[in-house]
Image (tube, rainbow, N blue to C red):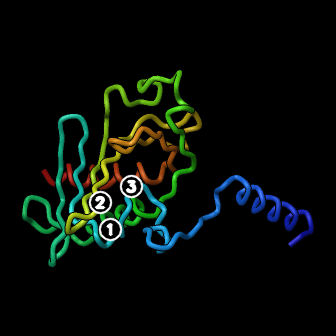
Amino acid sequence: MTRAATVLAIGYLCLMAFGGRLPHKHEDSPHSEGLYGLHEGKPSEIAVLIFTRENDEFRVVHDDSGWRINALPVNESLAEEIEALTKMLARAEPVRTFHPEDLAPVKDQDYGFKQLAFSVAAESRADGPKTWLEFGYSTPDQSLRYVRKRGDPALYVMSGFLFEQTEKVHERLASLN
């Protein structure tokens, strides 16, 4: 590694540390297990996913025999896509979080939430956390996505990968009907 690359790497890490982007573990929280996502539970504890887009709604349920839609088991490749999504929901950390005071002059429609196009809900087993994510527009460079948690006044800027995976699973479910 060249000296310039080393200095650049150290500078980047310092910027992340001072900007609050390095993970911090807190005991007695999902984050102590490396989970930083918008769903505050373990991926393995997600038992229900509900996908809503315009007039479509799909509900997939996980039981002892795997993922099911309308009581029928999903195929292995779709089950793998769903598992990947549950991991993203629990682990994908927001790139940035805007709190209400940061957004005072901005309206919901500016971020794509006036007429919601797409959402996904994740429910954990045994009265665990339930998270309902609403996806807004892409950021101007198309790499990130505005996301809201229902009932949470914050606006999250998330990697586009979370939306892409959610959309991929939704499209696969829609193709089953």
Dividing the picture into quadrants, the one containing residue 42 is bottom left
* Front residue of 35 and 138: 35
Task: Tell me: residue 64, above or below residue 132.
Answer: below
The residue lying toward the viewer, choosing from 134 and 83, is: 134
Mark 3 surroundings within 10 Å by alpha-carbon count, few (fewer than 14), some (14 through 19), many (20 or more): some
- Of badges 3 and 2, nearer the viewer stands 2
Q: Residue shown at 42%/55% (left/top)?
A: 38
- Mark 2 = which residue? 129
Q: Amino acid at mark 3?
A: Gln
Give the secondary structure at mark 2: loop
Query: On the rendered image, what quadrant is the N terminus found in?
Result: bottom right
Q: Which comes before the other along the chain, label 3 or label 1?
A: 1
* 173, above or below 128, in the image: above
From mark 3 to mark 1, how far is it between C-alphas?
A: 10 Å
Q: Which residue is drawn at the image coordinates 21% and 61% (left, top)?
A: 48
Residue labelled with disc 1: 83
Q: Nearer the viewer, mark 1 or mark 2?
A: 2
User: Could you say where residue 24 lies in the image, as x and y percent from the top left?
Assistant: 59, 66
In what element is the residue under mark 3? helix
